[in-house]
Image (cartoon, helix red, strand yellow):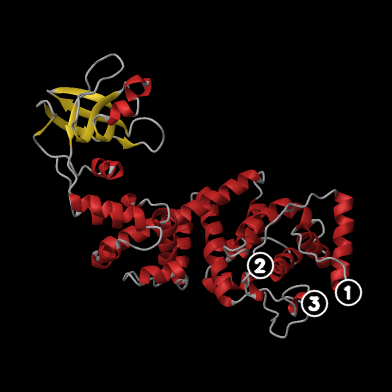
Amino acid sequence: MEKLMQFVWQHRLAVRPGMRTVDGRPLTIVNQGRLNTDAGPDFFNASITLDGETWVGNIEIHVRASDWYRHKHDSDPTYDSVILHVVQHNDMEIKRRDGSVIPQITITCTPEAARRCNSLLAEASHDLPCRSTIASTPSIYRSDWLTALAMERLYRKSERILQLVKDTAGHWEGAAYITLARGLGFGLNSDPFEMLAKSMPLQFLNKHADEQLTVEALLIGQAGLIPPQTTDEHPYTTRIREEYTFMAHKFSLNRPRLLWKLARTRPQNFPYRRIAMLAALIHSGFYLVGKLNDCKSVEQLRELFSVELTGFWATHFTFDTHSTSARSAAISKDSIDTLLINVAVPLMHARRMTLQDFEGMQHSVELLQQLASESNSIVRLFAGAGLKSPDAFTSQALVELRREYCEKNKCIYCRFGHRMLSAEIARP
């Protein structure tokens, strides 16, 4: 209930002319304050007019006035700045540490609003309790929120890349290499792929880039994926093991402990061939940021990631037996488009951010709008609620909505949740 009250207060749903405190004094809410998500009063920097006098300070919200004492705010100096106590049940007068009385106001949330709020918070991470609200929301309202979500996700990815650039001492290609490695994990193995790339920096690999087998040995060896020696193993396996053993000893390499997810995974999704793809790109000259800068179309971007494997990995998914189903293409077209969404476009956007090239940033957005929508469980979930995804820009918005709002039970901060709750406006 307290979260619902915070929602009501934050969006001024309880604010109206002629408000009075519980002791009858006229009250005007000039500014409801800024929601505080850390310790301390619920809203910072609020301003009110009480009996014609302006007060500036913080707002605290409780279901019952007596919660003030139950939470020991009366002895906490952090709460001396509270200028208004907002409650649903006024069961007692409250005071600051110095004994001064804090003005109170009551707001009453309707039973239906409480039911909806509880439904959102309890079920959001599993289903879509706002399903009916989404379906009935005007298209312009949905479009506005989805645009904001897609941009929120794109900027967050860009900020992650900019942090990698900072961590690599301004080396954009090094940051792009780590970003691509993470992208090749395709969610399932993103974390171990990123850890692998960080343990084997691009500058080091570039020194040995003329020998593709050495690059493969360094990456596969650091990944901990070279199998134990057997009497009938393939000559390639023996060479990879020997090369990694030599390089690890020569350069005192520290191999990270990576937890690869292989169980119940299709062979084409195993990390071996994707590491081989990364090695092939390094062997051919890794200048991803520079190449992206020259791309003007989706087709040109796809060509950058259309890698044909040669040798051992053209016919193997693992170090085990030869596979007739293996193809020389490192990854499928759909997987290439996934890399465009999660790697290429964010890299282009992040680079343009640093250059303050707003036209280039807009071009990144347009590329997402030209790519087909992702097909995953999240997109299908929202499609069932009447929210179709025509392109990758929209599917990215839906992923952001699900990951950052639904699964984190932040529905009261989502515009769909807001609309669902505001239909039952609380009354002061």
Residues 222 and 72: in front is 72
Crowd tier of the residue under label 1, counting other residues whose Cα lies within 10 Å: few below 14, some 14–19, many 20 or above: few
The quadrant where residue 417 appears: bottom left
User: What's the distance in space between the residues labelled 3 and 2, CA to CA?
Assistant: 23 Å
**Disc nearest the viewer among 3 and 2:** 2
**Disc nearest the viewer among 1 and 2:** 2
Residues 57 and 119: in front is 119
Q: Is residue 300 visible?
A: no
Question: Residue 366's x, y, as percent?
Answer: 44, 65
Q: Which mark is residue 262?
A: 2
Amino acid type of disc 3? Gly
Residue located at (43% from left, 65% from top) = 393
Quarter of the figure that contains the C terminus: top left
Q: Which mark is residue 235?
A: 1
Amino acid type of disc 2? Leu
Question: Residue 362's x, y, as percent?
Answer: 44, 59
The quadrant where residue 244 appears: bottom right
Residue located at (76% from left, 77% from top) = 310
Crowd tier of the residue under label 2, counting other residues whose Cα lies within 10 Å: few below 14, some 14–19, many 20 or above: few
Amino acid type of disc 1? Pro
Quarter of the figure that contains the N terminus: top left
The quadrant where residue 83 appears: top left
User: What's the distance in space between the residues labelled 3 and 1, CA to CA?
Assistant: 12 Å
Of callouts 3 and 1, the N-terminal one:
1
Left or right of 422, for residue 189? right
Of callouts 1 and 2, the N-terminal one:
1
Q: Which mark is residue 311?
A: 3
Crowd tier of the residue under label 3, counting other residues whose Cα lies within 10 Å: few below 14, some 14–19, many 20 or above: few
Q: Is residue 147 visible?
A: yes
Question: Residue 303's x, y, as percent?
Answer: 61, 73
